[in-house]
Amino acid sequence: MSITVNGKTIDVEADTSVDDVVAGLGLPDRGIAVAVDGAVVPRGRWARHTMTDGAVVEIVTAVQGG
């Protein structure tokens, strides 16, 4: 099945979780926020939240500045 991550379409297996997507992109599991289909997925739910075909995922990185 296919999902869109930050505007790019990628193929994933059925039952792919947010954790799997983040790890597959080589991103750290801290300092980022993930929204699936417009709803933020809390970090504690990443392992349980599975993708659906056509899901739109946005991943943003926290940036410290002043």
Image: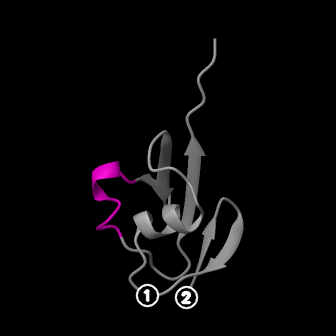
Q: Is residue 62 above or below residue 41?
A: above
What's under tag 2, amino acid-wise? Met
Magenta stretch: includes residue 44: yes
**Residue, x 48% and y 54% (percent of image)?**
35
List the residue tagged with mark 2.
1
* Element on which disc 2 rests: loop
* Secondary-structure class at tag 1: loop
Q: Is residue 54 left or right of residue 15?
A: right
* Quadrant where the image shows the C terminus: top right
Q: Position of residue 20 (x, y in %)?
A: 45, 70
Q: Quadrant of residue 15?
A: bottom left
Determine the image quadrant of residue 50: bottom left
In percent of the image, x 51 and y 61: which residue is there? 22
Q: Position of residue 14 (x, y in %)?
A: 43, 87
Q: Residue furthest right?
A: 8
- Position of the N terminus by quadrant: bottom right
Report x, y in % for residue 38. 50, 56
Q: Where are the magenta residues, as a range?
A: 41-49
Report which quarter residue 65 is drawn in: top right
Q: Main secondary structure of the magenta part?
A: loop
Q: Given contact means CB atoms under 8 Å apart, are the residues at marks 2 and 1 in contact? A: yes
Seen at 35% across and 60% down, the residue is 46
Asked if residue 15 lies in the magenta stretch, the reply is: no
**Which residue is under mark 1?**
14
Measure how far apart labels 2 and 1 are at the Cα level. 7 Å
18 relative position to 57: left or right:
left
Q: How many marks?
A: 2
Sequence-first tag of 2 and 1 = 2
Tell me which amino acid carries mark 1.
Ala
